[in-house]
Amino acid sequence: MNRTLIQFGIFALLLTSTACTQADVEPAKVPSPAKDVEHGGKGTANVVLAGGCFWCTEAVFERVPGVTNVVSGYAGGTKESAEYAAVSAGKTDHAEVIQVTYDPSKISYGQLLRIFFSAAHDPTQLNRQGPDSGRQYRSTIFYAGDEQKSVAEAYIKQLNDAKVFDKPIATTLESLAAFYPAEAYHQDYAKVHPDDGYLKQNLPQKLEKLAKALKQ
């Protein structure tokens, strides 16, 4: 999602074919996971997800009831630090991610994964989302512990077995080694820049699908 004039021109030419980054699947057809994480006690929990541009995924999950905070950042790379210029250039193998903090008494890990697959991005695209390409835009669930991994694996198998999408899910699983918050100007980007051209072209369909998913 670099913002040079040259890339913007290319993006404009490709707009009709790449503006929508969603698979053509109605949220109602995406079932809830048959298996979920068991949470005991009080407090919050976290999940780290990569689904393309973090401006969009952040904006989606900030609207989910039960989510208490969303931070854009980077994970999964080969370097012990991350910053936007290097990540966006594909130099570190980090992915753009969001760290979602949620209240398990109001929404579960599995329910968040359902939103991830049904509204936040297209899980059938490999190493890209719409106009953004490269492993930094890959679809990945960064699991923290065996239970999160097991639930995510089972859910991907459930969706593939049911042929919910017209192509196999490309989402990968990676153990969360570290999460690096992105620069301050990336945080709450859609709230601060509601008229951004990139968001106007790529966010509305996600929010429409989210609204449908939340009604289920």
Image (cartoon, rainbow, N blue to C red):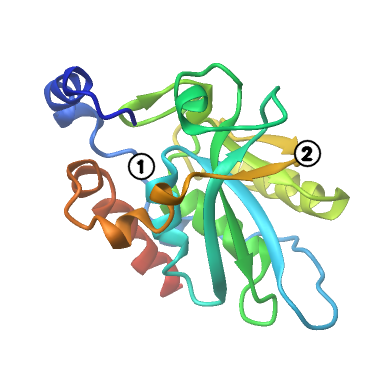
Q: CA distance from mark 2 to mark 1?
A: 28 Å
Q: Secondary structure at mark 2?
A: loop
- Residue drawn 75% across and 46% down? 143
Q: Which residue is mark 1?
A: 22
Q: Residue at x 50, y 38 (%)?
A: 123
- Picture quarter with the N terminus: top left
Q: Does the rendering let one see residue 207? A: yes
- The residue carrying mark 2 is 177
Q: Which residue corresponds to the image point at 45% horizontal and 19% vertical from the top-left?
A: 89
Q: Amino acid at mark 1?
A: Gln
Apparent side of residue 190 relative to residue 12 in the rendered image (left or right) = right
Instruction: Name the amino acid type tagged 2.
Output: Ala
Q: Nearer the viewer, residue 36 or 85?
A: 85
Q: Position of residue 96 (x, y in %)?
A: 52, 37
Q: Residue furthest front?
A: 184
Is there any visible trace of residue 208 in the rendered image? no
